[in-house]
Image (cartoon, rainbow, N blue to C red):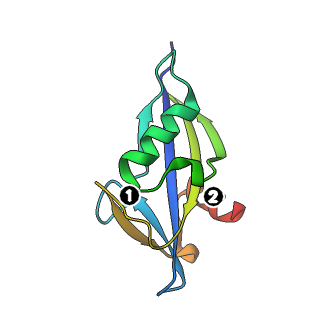
Amino acid sequence: MIKCKINLYVVVFNKTTFKYDLVSLKEYTICPISDILEANKDINILLKEMFEKHIELQSSFVSFVLSDIINSDELNINYYCLVPYATIINNSYLVPININEIHSPYLRKIFNLL
């Protein structure tokens, strides 16, 4: 059976710098909120749980958008969402993103969709 990993990129527009920040599990690098999708678990429930563990906002106020699916050693399903600037972040960090210097193809795709 193939392992399925869900990655959630939470994007925040910073009103003071007029740039985007990304919620990351690591302080200075981009590390999306991730979890393994178990066989009998609903993907929408998993996204809500992942989101509410790190963001103090009800998940019903955001839309989770599928950005891409990558099939390599494991199946990676990437989602993103936008949250308001003043949202409280728990157990994670806000990492500023310079759109012109994005090297990750996953992030490029997300910012092209915004």
SS at circle 1: strand
The residue under the point 33% across, 53% down is 25
The one nearer the camera, 41 or 97, is 41
The residue that disc 1 covers is 24
Circle 2 SS class: helix
Residue 37 x, y percent position in the rendering:
48, 26
Q: In the figure, residue 94 lies in which quadrant?
A: bottom left
Give me the C-alpha separation between circle 2 and circle 1: 15 Å
User: Among all residues in the image, which is located at the extreme right?
Assistant: 113
Quarter of the view holding residue 62: bottom right
Q: Residue at x 46, y 56 (%)?
A: 57
Q: Which residue is mark 2?
A: 110
Q: Residues within 10 Å of mark 1 (few under 14, many from 20)?
A: many
Q: Which residue is drawn at the image coordinates 51% and 53% (left, top)?
A: 9
Which residue is most to the top? 1
Q: Please give the label number shown on residue 109.
A: none
Seen in the image, is 87 located left or right of residue 44? left
Few, some or many C-alpha atoms within 10 Å of disc 2 (few <14, some 14-19, many ≥20)? some
Q: Vertical placement of 51 versus 3: above or below?
A: below
Q: Between 56 and 34, which is closer to the camera in this rendering?
A: 56
Vertical comparison of 22 with 43: above or below: below
Identity of the amino acid at label 1?
A: Ser
Do the CB atoms of the residues marked 2 and 1 lie less than 8 Å apart?
no
Q: Is residue 21 above or below residue 80?
A: below
Q: Amino acid at mark 2?
A: Ile
Q: Residue furthest bottom?
A: 16
